Amino acid sequence: MGKYLIAGLGNIGADYAGTRHNIGFDVLDSLVAGKEGRFSVERLAEMVEIKWHGQILVCIKPTTYMNESGRAVKYWMDREKIALDHILVVLDDLALPLTRLRLRPGGSDAGHNGLRSIQESLGTNAYPKLRFGIGNNFPKGRQVNFVLGRWTAEEMPVVQQKIGKSVEIIESYVTIGIERTMSQYNNLEFEL
């Protein structure tokens, strides 16, 4: 039986709920609800442990705010004795269109403050990431408003579809591994 750390990135508080930047929280909420788990407030994160096909998934939503996500990921990784290649960080990505999801075994922070914090805490960027494309449909200088904004009514159907697919990707990742999961899901294109 393997143990995995699944970290969904976001910001705590009602002001941030349902925003593009909180999609990591939303994906984990969907994953955990489907397994009848319930988050509880623990050290540096809301946490729940669920089981899936013989694997243990330690699911966390850091309560540190995005810029300090690394503190929570490092703490739970150490506490649960989880190897670097058994981590999966779920996050929003401006560089990917809304129609895409991308799983990778590593990669740079690409300007994402949550990933930058995790990279600083772990001393490497070589850990798996599931990037949820949010697109970059905003006027110059309005990136923060866009990222911290809520999904539009037009976007919601594809967002819901991608949340469901993200849950499948996580389940696949922990059962058949990253390479097979990448080849199965990285080329999917979602209809807007």
Image (spheres, helix red, strand yellow):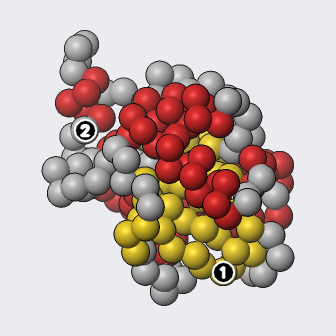
Instruction: Determine the residue located farthest toward the top in the rendered image.
Output: 140
> Identity of the amino acid at label 2?
Leu
Instruction: Quickly name the residue at label 1.
Output: 51
Q: How many marks?
A: 2
Instruction: Determine the residue located farthest toward the left in the rendered image.
Output: 15
Quick one: 15 or 26, which is closer to the camera?
15
- In the picture, measured across the screen, residue 36 lies left or right of residue 102, that is left
Q: Is residue 155 above or below residue 113?
A: below
Q: Position of residue 66 (x, y in %)?
A: 38, 40
- In the picture, measured across the screen, residue 47 lies left or right of residue 140, that is right
State how far apart marks 1 and 2 are (Cα): 32 Å
Give the structural element (helix, strand or loop) at label 2.
Answer: loop
Instruction: Quickly name the residue at label 2.
Output: 148
Please name the residue shown 43% across and 30% down the image. Answer: 113
Q: Position of residue 38 (x, y in %)?
A: 43, 80
Quick one: 127 or 181, which is closer to the camera?
127
Specify the quadrant of the image occupied by residue 119.
top right
Instruction: Determine the residue located farthest toward the bottom in the rendered image.
Output: 36
Q: Which comes sooner in the sequence, label 1 or label 2? A: 1
- In the picture, measured across the screen, residue 74 lies left or right of residue 37, that is right
Please name the residue shown 81% across and 58% down the image. Answer: 177
> Identity of the amino acid at label 1?
Lys
Q: Residues within 10 Å of mark 1 (few under 14, many from 20)?
A: some
- In the picture, measured across the screen, residue 9 lies left or right of residue 128, that is left
Q: Position of residue 24 (x, y in %)?
A: 45, 52
Q: Is residue 46 above or below residue 133?
A: below
Does residue 7 show up? yes
Please name the residue shown 47% across and 22% down the image. Answer: 111
